[in-house]
Amino acid sequence: MVLAKPENKHVLKAFDLTGKVAAITGGARGIGLEVSRALAEAGANVALIYNSSTNAATTAAEIASANNVKAAAYQANVSNKAEIERAIQQIASDFGRLDIIVVNSGITSNVAAEDYTAEQWKEIMQVNLDGAFYTAQAAAQIFKAQGSGNVIFTASVSATLVNIPQKQAAYNASKAGVVQLAKCLSVEWVDFCRVNCISPGFIETDILDIHPKEWREKWYSMVPAQRFADTYELKGRSLNLGRAKFDPQRCAAALRSILAQSGYGENALFREPRPSCRVVIYLTDLKTQKSFPLTSYESRRCPVELSMTATVVEAGQACLASLAGYEPVTMGSGGKRYCDSSRTIVNPVRQVWAEASGLWPGVLESQIGCVVSIGAGTASIKSKGMDEKMGVVRMLSKLDVHDPEREANAFLQEHTKLHDAGRLHRFSVPDGLRDIKVGEVKEMGLIMDVTRDYLTTELVYKQIRRCGSACVY
């Protein structure tokens, strides 16, 4: 019995990409065309990158008209590094930004492995693997500057299995390379974008029409569903990967709700007029990568325009923008974008101490009642690896490791008098958080459970009591 096809539902019922900009290589035909339509249906403005299509511009116009979005076609050969770089830069310039790149272009050939010429092998690799990297690399330059983005590769089940009866060693090898490339980039680029890979099986496209009837019959016999998938059946998968992992609007709404419960307006300024309250958070200028304190009081280290205009909601969103899924926040009249300082400062305890020293002249240790430092207790492995916090690859590198606990311990050693007097406390939820993917909302309960378990241990409970006593110093 042939498996029934699912209803071709409008994708906006499940996802919303309004205002996002997506570029799709091979976006004017086959799988790429359906992905282009899907992203546009979800509200994204789309750029169709094509090589030889004769109707790409017309297709883009139809997509734009049908979905009330902006769409355009751009010609580029993905195997030519300079061409694809120019096209992607032009797209970012024309649309004002780039949020999603779908690396979809690919070709195949059916040649016996022993008969491949160097030119035939090279052509497959140049388009399928080299072109995939050139495309992702060009987009990554933009994503890195923005602080966010999504890369979606189209690979194939042929990356992990050997298709029969056709012979296509070059194609299979190239797609296996794409899968491994996606894994590598998901780790290397974790600070500024997400990288994922889709590996379709047999999909009804015009590429299959060139194959002999007996091949198709053989393929049907190997597919339990007794049919090939239609291109539109990939729409949901593409959108699931293309949408932001975290919803900044939900974050902003939560912050506004907390403000309302506390009697503040949703646009309450971060600047705090009460002299008894001093708040400081550390942010990083996304363009210059320089960190600075955003203060609720006048400080020579804090840019004046931010000190006077930043809102509590903006500050909260910026603090969350230490993860690739959260977009940096635009603040101030200069239109600059900011994220949490953890991208450049692992544990700003020394910076906070220096800021406090400027507020209260004299020997700070003799004036302060209590210093409380709170952390997750796990090392941050930047750029060269990570201990699966938000990716799909578990990798632990010995290179470029930044340990917040090491910073905290060093600070403790520098201020032993405070520690010995019971006025310096470090609370750290240790190994429990290591196995929790903090980006998953559904696992927030697990995070709370681990934290609660930590706080209710007898030793930590006693430390909290001592900390409370010190706070009324």
Image (cartoon, rainbow, N blue to C red):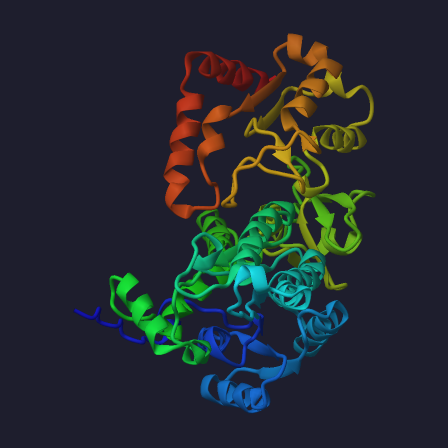
Residue at 70% from the left image edge and 63% from the top image edge: 138
Near-viewer residue (403 or 189): 189
Near-viewer residue (88 or 70): 88
Please provide percent x and percent y for residue 396.
59, 33
Counting labels gives: 0
Please provide percent x and percent y for residue 426.
59, 21
Quadrant containing the C terminus is top right
Horizontal side of residue 104 vs 66, given as left or right: right
Task: Name, please, the residue furthest toward the left.
Answer: 1
Please provide percent x and percent y for residue 15.
41, 67
Looking at the image, can residue 154 be seen?
no
Quadrant containing the N terminus is bottom left
Horizontal side of residue 240 vs 307, given as left or right: left
Residue at 73% from the left image edge and 64% from the top image edge: 335
Looking at the image, can residue 395 be seen?
yes
Q: Is residue 37 above or below residue 136?
A: below
Corner quadrant of residue 212: bottom left
Task: Name, please, the residue furthest toward the top.
Answer: 420
Q: Is residue 82 above or below residue 331?
A: below
